[in-house]
Image (cartoon, rainbow, N blue to C red):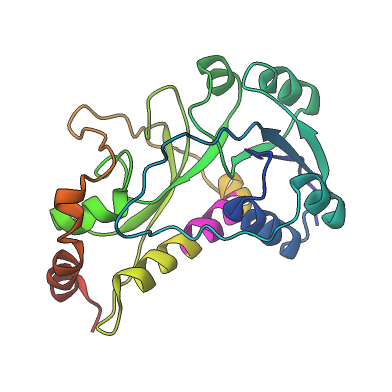
Amino acid sequence: MNQPKIAVISYNTPHRKTQDVLNGLKAKGYKNVHVFALPFVQRENPFKPIYQHRPSKSIEVEPIDFCQNFDYAFDLTTADSLNNQLNDFQADYVIIAGAGLLPDELVENHKIINTHPGFLPLTRGLDSLKWAITKGVEIGVTTHFVDTEADAGFLIEQKRVAVYNNDTFHSVAYRQYEIEIEMLVNSIELIPTLSHFKSLSSNEFEATRRMPKAIEENLMQAFETYKQQFKVD
């Protein structure tokens, strides 16, 4: 197979999404993969939701060892140095597997691929799955090229997340996560087949913040209402 040069942006700590993305790339037979690991800063008072909806348990293997086991290159980086490192690597594709807000210079100089757990621009911001349920809009996943506007950029692909009668909130959340990983890995094959990437910029939909617990405490009831409206027969 043609071996593109793939850069993966992540954290310098064991990280579930990164490990799943690297597993997907390895399963697809990609060999020329280079992981650039940003420092992971643990917040003093991290936000603790009532309902955790993202898989978080990773394999307790340091990122450098995980990459070595896959025969993938690994380098430490910072937000300030990543732009030059990507310029030197000259990647065909740059994937976000884990990162906070990236500097504008980096986003403007490189076509960086991200997956967002919601339909953009309809559900922008944090806790998109939870907000989609409480607002009664369909659950989805968007793959896109990022730009300097949060959760915008240019569309690569969107998919709906099916909801079935026997689903729980957490089974849907995990299904959405699996689709995110699959779409991110598959974007490398999909992008060359596309000729147009629609802008996702919009002033109509505001980015959401973390869901307040006063709303989140009613999430399970909201999910049952949502399921009756959107379930697949």
Position above or below: 146 against 216: above
Position above or below: 26 against 14: below
Viewer-side residue, 103 vs 197? 103
Q: Quadrant of residue 32?
A: top right
Position above or below: 212 against 139: above
The total number of labels drawn is: 0
Residue sitting at 55 percent across and 51 percent down?
Answer: 184
- Where is residue 3 shown, x and y percent of the image? 80, 48
Viewer-side residue, 44 vs 100? 44
Query: Is residue 31 at all visible to an observer of this figure?
Result: no
Q: Residue furthest front?
A: 44
Query: Is residue 59 at all visible to an observer of this figure?
Result: yes
Q: Predominant secondary structure in magenta?
A: helix
- Where is residue 64 shown, x and y percent of the image? 80, 45
Q: Quadrant of the C terminus?
A: bottom left
Magenta part of the protein: which range?
Answer: 179-187
Q: Is residue 199 left or right of residue 84?
A: left
Position above or below: 200 against 67: above
Residue sitting at 46 percent across and 60 percent down?
Answer: 177
Q: Quadrant of residue 52?
A: bottom left
- Where is residue 137 shown, x and y percent of the image? 18, 56
Magenta stretch containing residue 129, yes or no?
Answer: no
Q: Is residue 50 left or right of residue 62?
A: left
Q: Quadrant of the N terminus?
A: bottom right
Residue sitting at 68 percent across and 61 percent down?
Answer: 59
Q: Is residue 102 left or right of residue 148?
A: right
- Where is residue 222 shown, x and y percent of the image? 14, 64
Magenta stretch containing residue 182, yes or no?
Answer: yes
Viewer-side residue, 152 vs 17? 17
